[in-house]
Image (cartoon, rainbow, N blue to C red):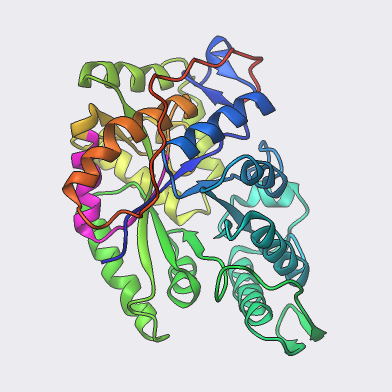
Amino acid sequence: MQPLEFGWFLPTSGDTLAYGDPDETIATNPEHLMKVVAAVEAADFDYMLIPVARYCWEAYVSGAFAAANTAKVAPLIAARPGYMNPVLLAKMIATFDQFSGGRICVNLIAGQADEEIRSEGVTLAKEDRYAIMEEEVSIMKALWTSDEPLHFKGRFHELKGALCIPKPLQKPYPKFYLGGGSEEAWNLSAKHSDVHLFWGDLPEKIEANIAEIRERAATHGRRDDIGFGMRLQIVCRETEEEALAAADKLIFNIAEEARDDLKRYTASSKANQRVQELVAEKGMWIAPHLWSGLTRFRPGAGIGVVGNPEQVAATLQQFIDAGCHSFCLSGYLHHEEAWRFGNWVRPILERQNPGRFGGNDRVLEASKPVAASKKAHIY
């Protein structure tokens, strides 16, 4: 069994306790982001997801500042097909890895909303984005593992004597993560990913998906090389009643017509379609303590685990038992929820899964974090 690992989210498009309520929203600012980074480091998270949506601050610069202000956590930053020359991207990632002491992970993202990528000048169809990503990952891995000049001729790239200096500090190279529900995503993960991240779903469905992707990985000789994880929201409070109230507050002020906008925006995403199927079939609660409220209005990984510390830990344990070892989490406000997870939930999981945690000494604040000051609404 692989060691358990936990990641947290850096909210570079803003933070909130209530979507749709400007009075409860914190606009992106360095002070708040550094507060989240400090909380993530103190709670001993292994990695930190830096988002790349169009309303977010630039991910590599944000991740570099996060790494410079921490000693343990590794930024998880996207490689997006068609956005950057793969030789330059390989150099950027390797240089980041050297400066940070081996602390960067690569998030493979190809299945973004067509509307968003077109707004940024990328015109490739979804199937072509996955095809060019496969080329680019193959190029980066080759550049990182050979001292010889790379000659490469593919459908999208042709290289004649390319080199990557420096090489990554991590050997053979940083870990690759991928989240997606399409055939293209599963096939790319099977060939290249260290961790395939699923969005919230029923544990039995996740177990079946793991078996399917593992079989695909076996065709590349990687049956035991690929790991699996969950991308989930966390709403944890001392009591179940408080957690339910916090979850309800997150979506209380969002207009119902936002659901139609979401469906249009995510029409080409298999993972988003699966989420909407769950909502239609199961309603607000797809299982005890698995809440779909945010998915009614928020694209992406909106299914959350809601409850007191014991209930949250028990729900995550179901996914561990299904075969997941990595958990990429987020919650509101992000520095406060990171503190709650680190102090309340993680110790329970450590007791339930002896020998599956890393050896980092945990340094946690003795008291709850001070709430951040509220800024202008930017969503």
Residue at image position (74%, 57%) is 122
Which one is in front, 102 or 25?
A: 102
* In the image, residue 227 lies in the stretch drawn in magenta: no
Q: In terms of secondary structure, what is the magenta stretch mainly? A: helix
Q: Residue at x 49, y 19 (%)?
A: 255
Please say if 164 is above or below 354: below
Q: Is residue 321 magenta?
A: yes
In the image, taking residue 303 as reference, residue 345 lies left or right, namely left
Nearer to me, 153 or 264: 153
Residue situated in front as seen by the camera: 373 or 218: 373
Q: Which residue is pictured at 62% across the width and 82% down the height?
A: 145
Q: Position of residue 129 (x, y in %)?
A: 63, 66
Q: Where is residue 1, by image quadrant?
A: bottom left
Q: Which residues are magenta?
A: 312-329
Q: Estimate the x, y position of residue 239 in percent, counting from the top left.
A: 22, 19
Image position of 32 (left or right of 270): right
Q: Is residue 204 left or right of residue 12?
A: left
